[in-house]
Image (cartoon, rainbow, N blue to C red):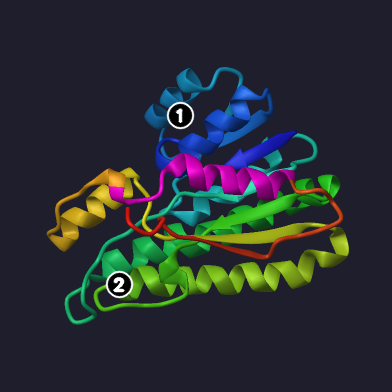
């Protein structure tokens, strides 16, 4: 099987890439810079690593031509997060979160749809609980993730005739570097043991990718277990 992943450098994306690599699947990984690409190439021998900056979605134009043959799954894991009240959030923070979390996934999906249609593959959007409920100081991030839900829902309807399945995963708080950064922005002490492990979320994504062709799972919500 062949899989295209964003966000494979850390957290959920790294856990998923390791699982796929360990079982011998082919990986196509996106990196934001040549330096990051070299790091991923060292970590995942045999993987194809493509350079594109998700904060600049135009760099994704034409990237589909760099991928050969059918693609069994495209998994959007990478994300950007910057908390801030509406009356204080900078335009640059809005632009980055909308670009990385919404526009880039749309462009990358468009680029890879011919390959996904060949395989009757699966697109997985790793969203967030913020894609369902927006709280104070989360406006830009939640707006981008609400938009990502809309993208997934529309794509699911459009691609049904081609046999492409579309799933969205809504993780709650997960013990990732982004979560640690978030705690810093919130002024809270970070304790990774309180949250779901990235490997657990990766296992859920793997289930979606491996799901037999007689069914589809449109949406999955994941929360840390009570008492953690």
**Residue position marked by numbered label 1 in the rendering:** 37
The picture places residue 75, in percent across and down from the top left corner, at 60, 48
Q: Residues within 10 Å of mark 2 (few under 14, many from 20)?
A: some
On the picture, is 130 further left or further right than 136? right
Marks 2/1: CA–CA distance: 31 Å
Who is closer to the viewer here, 5 or 96? 5
- Residue 95 spot, x, y in % from top left: 35, 66
Write the residue at 40% across / 70% down. Answer: 130
Residue 8 appears in the picture as rendered: no
| Disc 2 secondary structure class | loop
How many labels, in total? 2
Q: Is residue 201 magenta?
A: yes
Q: Mark 2 points at which residue?
A: 138
Residue at horizontal 82%, vertical 52%? 117
Q: Position of residue 9 (x, y in %)?
A: 42, 35
Q: In which quarter of the image is residue 81?
A: bottom left
**Nearer the observer, disc 2 or disc 1?**
2
Q: Quadrant of the N terminus?
A: top right
How dense is the environment of label 1, judged by Cα within 10 Å: few (below 14), some, or many (20 and up)? many
Residue extending farthest to the front is 227
Q: What stretch is highlighted in magenta?
A: 194-210
Residue at x-position 62% and y-position 54%: 124
């Amino acid at each position: 099987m062949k899989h295209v992943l964003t966000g494979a450098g850390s957290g959920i994306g790294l856990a998923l890439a390791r699982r796929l690599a360990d079982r011998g699947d082919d990986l196509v990984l996106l990196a934001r810079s040549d330096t990051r690409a070299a790091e991923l190439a060292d970590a995942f021998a045999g993987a194809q690593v493509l350079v594109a900056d998700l904060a600049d979605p135009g760099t994704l134009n034409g990237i589909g031509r760099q991928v050969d043959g059918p693609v069994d799954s495209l998994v959007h894991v990478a994300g950007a997060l910057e908390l801030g009240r509406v009356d204080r959030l900078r335009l640059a923070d809005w632009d980055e979160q909308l670009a990385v979390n919404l526009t880039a996934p749309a462009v990358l999906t468009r680029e890879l749809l011919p390959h996904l249609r060949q395989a009757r593959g699966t697109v997985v959007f790793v969203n967030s609980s913020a894609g369902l409920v927006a709280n104070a100081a989360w406006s830009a991030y939640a707006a981008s993730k609400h938009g990502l839900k809309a993208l997934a829902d529309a794509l699911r309807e459009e691609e049904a005739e081609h046999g492409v399945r579309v799933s969205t995963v809504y993780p709650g708080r997960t013990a990732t570097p982004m979560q640690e950064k978030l705690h810093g922005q919130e002024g809270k002490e970070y304790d990774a043991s309180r949250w779901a492990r990235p490997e657990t979320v990766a296992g859920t994504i793997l289930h979606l990718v491996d799901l037999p062709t007689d069914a589809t799972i449109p949406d999955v919500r994941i929360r840390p277990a009570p008492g953690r």
